Amino acid sequence: MTIVGYICVIIAVLWILHKVRVSYLSFGGTVMVTVYDAAIFPPILVVFGLYWVLPTLGVDFPIWAYAAIGLGVAVLVVIGIRVAEELGDRRR
């Protein structure tokens, strides 16, 4: 499951970067695109990936820590998307 965990984390990071890029290129939100799904699914992938990877590295987090990591990633993704939309608006 360690390989699957690493793959989940890599997919989540690539998904988030793609959605931030799309929101930047959407000219500040004037072009309607769905980017906020990156605040739902990738944090779940990150949590599952870390849940499968960290115990093999000797790190033993309680379940609530994984939930906190997922919520933190979701908040950071939303902030990143909003900043990318604002920067995309200034680029125009």
Image (tube, helix red, strand yellow):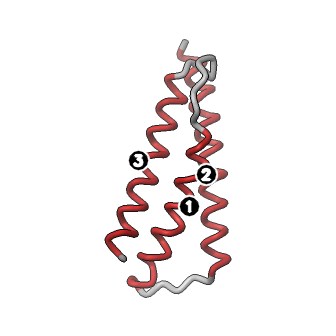
Q: Secondary structure at mark 1?
A: helix
Residue that carries the numbered disc 2 in the rendered image: 40
Q: Which amino acid, by three-letter code, is at mark 2?
A: Ile
Report the residue that reaches farthest toward the top: 92
How many neighbours does mark 3 have within 10 angstroms: few (below 14), some (14-19), or many (20 or more)?
few
Which one is nearer the viewer's eye here, 79 or 11? 11
Q: Quadrant of the N terminus?
A: bottom left
Viewer-side label of 1, 3:
1
Question: Percent position (x, y) of residue 33?
Answer: 57, 27
The answer to which image quadrant residue 47 occupies is bottom right
How many neighbours does mark 2 have within 10 angstroms: few (below 14), some (14-19), or many (20 or more)?
some
Say which label, 2 or 3, has the lower sequence index. 3
Say which label, 1 or 3, has the lower sequence index. 3
Residue that carries the numbered disc 1 in the rendered image: 44
Q: Which amino acid, by three-letter code, is at mark 1?
A: Ile
Q: Is residue 78 above or below residue 58?
A: above
In the shown orientation, is residue 4 left or right of residue 84? left
Which residue is painted at 60% across and 28% down in the image? 85
Q: Which amino acid, by three-letter code, is at mark 3?
A: Leu
The answer to which image quadrant residue 6 occupies is bottom left
Whole-Å distance between the Cαs marked 2 and 3?
A: 14 Å
Residue that carries the numbered disc 3 in the rendered image: 14
Question: Percent position (x, y) of residue 30?
Answer: 63, 17
Question: Percent position (x, y) of residue 75?
Answer: 66, 51
Whole-Å distance between the Cαs marked 1 and 3?
A: 14 Å
Which residue is painted at 61% across and 22% down in the image? 32
